[in-house]
Amino acid sequence: MTRSKMWALAGAAGALALVLSACTGSATPGDTAGGAGQKIKIGIKFDQPGLGLQEGNTFTGFDVEVAKFVAGEMGYAANQIEFVESQSAQRETMIQAEQVKLIFATYSITDSRKEKVSFGGPYFIAGQDLLVRADDTSITGPATLEGKRLCSVTGSTPAQKIKADYPGVELVEYGTYSMCVSALESNGVDAVTTDNVILAGFAAQPQYAGKLRVIGEPFTEERYGVGLKKGDIETCTKVNDAITKMVETGAWKKALADTVGKSGFEPDDRNPPTPDACS
């Protein structure tokens, strides 16, 4: 073989290697662009009935259904979605560290959170409320919580609200709402506070039927957004377009009825909301 042919073959091999490298390059953590066999990591809650609940290898709830619809509009099939547990106190960190691409986890849009992450949506509006034992008539709203033991989740908006506005309340913080609800049933705390739609899901669970009730007097507005990397306007726009389509096609209403609706919860007239402009 002549020297010129050797150089030609080497050049061709190098070009082929570059093409293969481009086609099979490594994926960004938390997100691999849509394509066969590639996945998107999405954060959800694993312990919120009606919203985000893991049972074996199955994930159910309204947040899950919205996540699947949005991911589908972004080019991902259901089997390309990898759900990752996203506890309240860890959500900003998970997005910043690119452990997930998106978070659908009853994630209230707040100014302080927007300093660290961006949001698509909102896709639902809830309100903070109280869950009590069914036979307890002493608690009728946040003004009657003085001296009571109230449970919420570390890093959550409801916990921050109680600390700021109701200093006379003894706040007990756990890592998950399921732990709070269990403590309520066993008389370890007097009430649980978080969003009404979350509390309704717990109250409707078979093991709590007739034992717990939601007060039904929401005292905040919680706008559930889709957490994503700060400044990622492109992804935010895709998310908002998908949410808008979900509402317009009736898929949003059906998903809510099939999940949260089973608890008897009915959304107020603020729903479905219009997504905010991406920024």
Image (cartoon, helix red, strand yellow):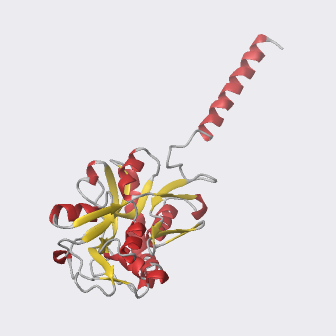
Residue in view at x 31 percent, y 57 percent: 155
User: How many labels were placed on the picture?
Assistant: 0
Up-down relation of residue 230 to residue 3 (above or below): below
Q: Is residue 205 visible?
A: no
Q: Identify which residue, 140 or 273, lies in the foreground.
A: 140
Q: Quadrant of residue 148?
A: bottom left
Residue in view at x 34 percent, y 86 percent: 134
| Residue 70 x, y percent position in the rendering | 46, 64
Q: Identify which residue, 134 or 217, lies in the foreground.
A: 134
Q: Is residue 64 visible?
A: yes
| Residue 115 x, y percent position in the rendering | 26, 49
Q: Quadrant of residue 9?
A: top right
| Residue 222 x, y percent position in the rendering | 27, 68
Residue in view at x 28 percent, y 85 percent: 136
Farthest right residue in view: 1
Farthest front residue in view: 187
Relative to 3, 178 lies left or right: left
Up-down relation of residue 278 to residue 29 (above or below): below
